[in-house]
Amino acid sequence: MTIARLFSVAGALAASLNLPITARADRDADWQALTKDVSAVKMEGSPGSVSLLGRRALPLALSKDRECALAASVLRDEENGARVVAMAHTGFMDATDDDMRAFLTNVTKWTGRKDRPVIGHWSGSAAGFQRLGFDLVDVSDASKSKGIKADLIVISLHRPGAKAAIEWAKKETARGCGLVLASTPWAADKEVL
């Protein structure tokens, strides 16, 4: 799906939600930050869908079935709330072409709130981000991750220890740490979902 087509859908959605002016302005700024230099998001395989929650929630890509396969939101709609990007297919975390490299770079900067955020990853979940030159810290061993202050966490629900990763991420997002969460829901361990 092209970004221009999705932009018109997102704009119509924002207007129909009757959001306060500040929420609309935040959504517009978020949209611009997430889609800068991206003309299309590559969607391979069979993505699942994600639900949108909050006034600042943005659909970023729709599947061929017109289900939301990528979304961004801000935890509790708070100004300093954790920024979250949910991906309904692990393939979105691969930087396979220029558009996807730009998209993952934008996602990293937006969720981490910095140009060079520290990325905490769980069991190798962030290889695509590392190929983009971002610094990664493995936080999958809880005893070693104490005291690590990642700016964002990247978790694939298909990696070992995903359930423990979610518990850890809940604590980190409560302090404003960003989260990129990827799963192909139909293929994920149902205990994790």
Image (cartoon, rainbow, N blue to C red):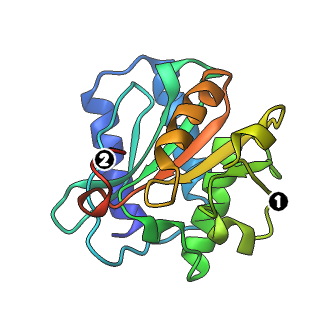
Where does label 2 land, which residue? Answer: 50
| Residue 192 place in picture, x, y as percent | 36, 45
Residue placed most toward the observer, 54 or 28: 54
Q: CA distance from mark 1 to mark 2?
A: 28 Å
User: Considering the numbered disc 1 on the image, is that residue within a helix, a strand or a loop?
Assistant: loop
| Visible residue check, residue 150 | no
Residue drawn at (60%, 53%) of the image: 107
Is 115 situated left or right of 75 in this image?
Answer: right
Is 106 situated left or right of 190 in this image?
Answer: right
Residue drawn at (56%, 17%) of the image: 78
| Residue 26 place in picture, x, y as percent | 55, 30
Q: Earlier in the sequence, mark 1 or mark 2?
A: 2
Q: Residues within 10 Å of mark 1 (few under 14, many from 20)?
A: few
Amino acid residing under circle 1:
Asp
Where does label 1 land, which residue? Answer: 135
Q: From what the image shows, is residue 44 above or below residue 176? A: below
Residue drawn at (44%, 65%) of the image: 90
Q: Residues within 10 Å of mark 2 (few under 14, many from 20)?
A: many
Q: From what the image shows, is residue 40 above or below residue 82? A: below
Residue placed most toward the observer, 101 or 148: 148
